[in-house]
Image (cartoon, rainbow, N blue to C red):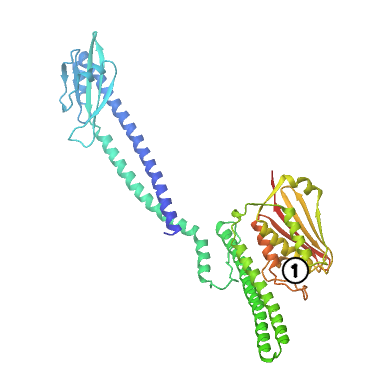
Amino acid sequence: MSIKQKITIVFGLLVATILLLFSFFIFQAYESYRRSLMRTRLQRRALSAQAYFLNRNEFQQSSYLTLPEQHEMLFDGANKVIYASNGPNDYVPSSTLLQDARRREVYFTYFNPMWDSEKEGVVLSFRYKHRVYVALVTAYDLTGRQTSRNLVAILIGGNILSLAVIVLAGFLFARRAMHPFDQLISQINAATVNDFSFRLIYKSQPDEANYLAGSFNQLLSRLQQLALSHEHFVGYASHEIRTPLTVVKGMLETGLAYDTTLKSAQESIEKALHRLEGAIELANSLLQLTEVEGLNPGRLLEDINLVDTILDTVGYFQEKYPPQQIELQLTDIFTENSSRIKVVGNNSLLRTALINIIDNACKYSNHQPVKVQITYQSFWVIIAVVDQGVGIPETQLSDVFLPMMRAENVGTVKGFGLGLTLAEKIVKIHGGVLVITSVPNQGTTVSIRLPALSL
């Protein structure tokens, strides 16, 4: 069922309910007025029964001004009938009713098979010459009942006609309201699957359809960037893996064909192994990136000792790059609050992110000192890695987190362009933020902001 149909049905049901309630109110208001008017007429006729004792001729003459199906009865103190009119005598009052009438006026209704609606009556008492008499008058409100039936017919017909008009108006309204969405759907249906340059055309008006189109276009832009990144990633990764494998194959084929001594064969095998190590390192990096993307942040609940993790990482690089100087600085504010803050996550993953960041700083620092600083700011622990290397061009700063992307000024420094991508994903999993600032030929600062809980 389309939204237009749902709007039409719901709108129709809502208005139909309102019409029914309003019609019920009108009918009940009229019925209340009809009963009140009929009761007043019966009451006046019952009170005129006093003329039976005062002036018989006047009473007989007034009996001609009767209501439809009117019947009158007078009772004495012993509930004996002393007068009954010529009308249809289809109601026999009980002694309890007559007794109640001596205390108060009683209005009642009863059913007569000859009529499709109830007849009505009033019984009341009056005093004449120190005696109490009871007058009872019954009648059928023929005019009022006919008017009531006509009113019901008018309300039913009016409701049906009004509902038909309202449903049609609701459908036209829903169709007009959904027209901008229909236009967007027709544009989407006409688009091809692989065309990420497709964008929705919409008017710059502040309504939901235009907001949806704008959000959809933003999503398409992100998907286009992702597709281009994926295409670049696949092409670069397959080239980086295929190249060393091709070189290894060539070396082994050459060695098999031309190496005649054990020494020359060993040299060929060593060169082939060196190339294979690069391919294996790239494959491991790709696998590690895939594993990190599939991690659930809710499961990283390990308490991390940042100082031990960073000391362990710095010790690793002192063994990997012995000449490289790495300075570790713990600010006073961090030292003062270190015992009262806690970082939750995964120690191994955070170490991997630090290794990738510090490794880049060491490779591109031109043997200049690398500084690692830890500080604390309002529920955040900040780890800054500062180098004095070649830096990153400003135009490429936004692309450094894309997989297999490397700056144009890296020169002959080896790498795969996966370190910062992996580091950023790990930091995001920990609920943190990775920020890079750089000035070409002056250095780069990579800051890791991790949320810290207060104890």
Question: Residue drawn at (31%, 42%), measured in percent from left and top?
Answer: 152
Helix, strand or loop under label 1: helix
User: Please, is residue 39 above or below residue 381 in the view?
Assistant: above
Report the side of 455 relative to 168 (left or right).
Answer: right
- Decide which of 129, 104 is in the foreground and name it: 104
Question: Residue drawn at (42%, 51%), measured in percent from left and top?
Answer: 10
The answer, for residue 65, to whether it is visible in the render is: no
- Decide which of 79, 274 is in the foreground and name it: 274
Q: Please state which amino acid type lies under the numbered disc 1.
A: Thr
Q: Quadrant of residue 397?
A: bottom right
The answer, for residue 415, to whether it is visible in the render is: yes
Residue 279: where, in percent of width, then height? 66, 75
Q: The N terminus appears in which quarter of the rendering?
A: bottom left
Q: Quadrant of residue 201?
A: bottom right
Residue 135: where, in percent of width, then height? 22, 19
- Decide which of 5, 330 is in the foreground and name it: 330
Residue 345: where, in percent of width, then height? 65, 54
- Decide which of 367, 110 is in the foreground and name it: 367
Residue under numbered circle 1? 395
